[in-house]
Image (cartoon, grey):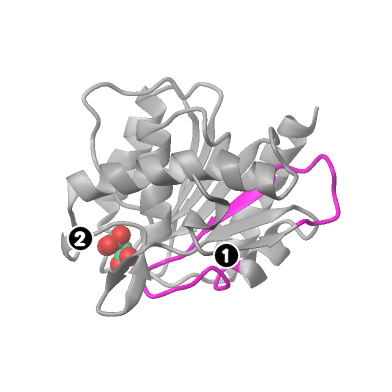
Amino acid sequence: MNPDFFLHHFEPGGEVRAPVLLLLHGTGGTELDLIPLARQLAPAAPVLSPRGRVLENGMPRFFRRLAEGVFDEEDLRRRAAELAEWIPVAAAHHGVAGRPVVAVGFSNGANIAAALLLLHPGVLRGAGLLRALVPLVPATLPPLSATSVLLVSGTADPIVPLANARRLAGLFREAGAEVAHLELPGGHNLGMADVIEARAWLGHVAAGLRT
Ligand code: MLT
């Protein structure tokens, strides 16, 4: 696979031992959307940020949906497999081969990150999922015992029902992941509390991966 299979943005960062931050934007976003967030979360980490290859009325996404919250599972599986294949290729291309990869995704980007964890364990060492839904339920749960997952949900999110986010947290727990699920007052948009919580979580995960 070509490293340019996904149009993407890469920043080398300043810290040689930091995990690579994989940024996954929300619907209608681009590879540049979450860069300011990444710099607040981990100023010195290398950043790999692809743009979703699906267009919905001109808006980039990481997989097709049939309606709000109703996903095209076949497409989701295909796109997750493409992303799983691309990550090590792009990492090698940018000189960070073999470094642990931790995803930070928002909304549609959080959903594809959740699908990556459920379908392609081993690609990500951790994932910060901001406003994620259950993307799909695999027939058998993957072994995720070496994986750290942060879910941050909004208690008044009109797009992500809290019960659905709790179900996702439950799936990850059942798969053996180390899971923290925070339910913040607020809706689908991110706020300062998300930044504070994600930064603390990422610092903890990165410290564990650096040893
Ligand atoms: C999705 O389609 O992945 C979710 O409904 C969230 C969104 O991107 O709007």
Query: In the rendering, which numbered label is found on residue 193?
Result: 1
Q: Residue 139, position in %: x, y? A: 21, 25
Rendered-image quarter of ligand 1: bottom left
Q: Nearer the viewer, residue 104 or 155?
A: 104
> Does the beta carbon at disc 2 come under 8 Å from ligand 1?
yes
Q: Residue 75, position in %: x, y? A: 23, 49
Q: Is residue 176 above or below residue 58?
A: above
Q: Nearer the viewer, residue 55 or 133?
A: 55
Q: Nearer the viewer, residue 200 or 52?
A: 52
Type of secondary structure dominating the magenta stretch:
loop
| Residue drawn at (77%, 43%) of the image | 18
**Residue 192 position by quadrant:** bottom right
Q: Is residue 89 above or below residue 110?
A: above
> Does the beta carbon at disc 1 come under 8 Å from ligand 1?
no
- Please report the bounds of the magenta region as a residue range: 12-34
Which secondary structure lies at badge 2? strand
Q: Which residue is mark 2?
A: 65
Residue 134 visible in this rendered orientation of the protein: no
In the displayed structure image, the side of residue 41 where residue 1 appears, left or right: left
Query: Mark 2: which amino acid?
Result: Arg
Neighbour class for label 2 at 10 Å: few (<14), some, many (≥20)?
some
